[in-house]
């Protein structure tokens, strides 16, 4: 269920990036100081290419992680408080798929948020990032990552005890 959602969100990321590019000034503010004011700029083309690469790399990381884990020898895998050698490899793969695809979804949502913040900041003169919204997005992303990590650890421990 999470894999198709992650794929759809990364497609949405590319679409939003390229559609929103038309509303960005050239040069576009891409980095902001501790007060939210722009202190780094880039050409629109450079911004679009860089963000496209970031989106593609995070998509690849989240969506290819299960493929890598399936090809990793069981003796190289470790989970705190869990004897992975006792678990069927299919169960390990299924749990890691869930974590990996959850990671991909969280990262895709965070990237959408960052792109929206970048577009919003560049509509102001001078360009200014809403730090409150940035921190809210970062906190939600971190909470989601902690929840995913706790979920997979608890799922592995339940499977190990069964």
Image: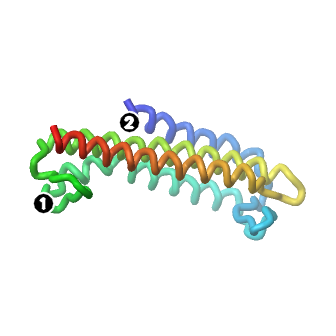
Separation of marks 1 and 2 at Cα, in angstroms:
27 Å
Label 1–label 2 contact, CB within 8 A:
no
Q: Residue at x 67, y 49 (%)?
A: 136
Residue extending furthest toward the top: 1
Q: State whether residue 1 is above or below residue 160.
A: above
Percent coordinates x, y for residue 131 in the rendering: 75, 56
Percent coordinates x, y for residue 37 in the rendering: 81, 64
Residue at the spot of label 1: 75
Q: Nearer the viewer, residue 37 or 96?
A: 96
Q: Nearer the viewer, residue 74 or 28?
A: 74
Task: Specify few, some or many for label 1: CA neighbours under 10 Å numbering under 14, 14-19, or 20 or more.
Answer: few
Q: Quadrant of residue 42?
A: bottom right
Q: Residue at x 20, y 52 (%)?
A: 82
Q: Is residue 117 left or right of residue 139?
A: right
Q: Is residue 21 left or right of residue 158?
A: right
Label ID, residue 3: 2
The N terminus lies in quadrant: top left
Percent coordinates x, y for residue 86 in the rendering: 10, 48
Q: Residue at x 69, y 45 (%)?
A: 116
Q: How many marks?
A: 2
Q: Residue at x 75, y 59 (%)?
A: 28
Q: Nearer the viewer, residue 9 or 156?
A: 156
Does dot 2 land on a helix, a strand or a loop?
A: helix
The C terminus lies in quadrant: top left
Task: Specify few, some or many for label 2: CA neighbours under 10 Å numbering under 14, 14-19, or 20 or more.
Answer: some
Percent coordinates x, y for residue 67 in the rendering: 25, 48
Choose the circle earlier in sequence order: 1 or 2.
2
Q: Is residue 69 left or right of residue 119?
A: left
Does dot 1 land on a helix, a strand or a loop?
A: helix
Q: Say which of marks 1 and 2 sits in front.
A: 1
């Amino acid at each position: 269920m999470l894999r198709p959602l992650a794929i759809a969100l990364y497609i949405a990321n590319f679409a939003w990036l390229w559609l929103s590019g038309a509303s960005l000034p050239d040069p576009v503010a891409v980095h902001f100081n501790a007060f939210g004011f722009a202190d780094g700029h880039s050409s629109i083309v450079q911004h679009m290419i860089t963000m496209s690469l970031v989106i593609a790399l995070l998509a690849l990381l989240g969506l290819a992680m299960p493929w890598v884990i399936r090809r990793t020898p069981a003796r190289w895998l470790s989970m705190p408080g869990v004897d992975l050698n006792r678990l069927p490899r299919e169960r390990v793969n299924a749990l890691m798929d869930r974590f990996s695809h959850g990671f991909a979804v969280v990262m895709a949502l965070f990237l959408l948020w960052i792109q929206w913040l970048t577009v919003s900041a560049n509509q102001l003169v001078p360009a200014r990032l809403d730090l409150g919204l940035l921190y809210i997005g970062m906190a939600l992303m971190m909470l989601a990552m902690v929840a995913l990590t706790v979920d997979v650890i608890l799922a592995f421990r339940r499977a190990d005890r069964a």
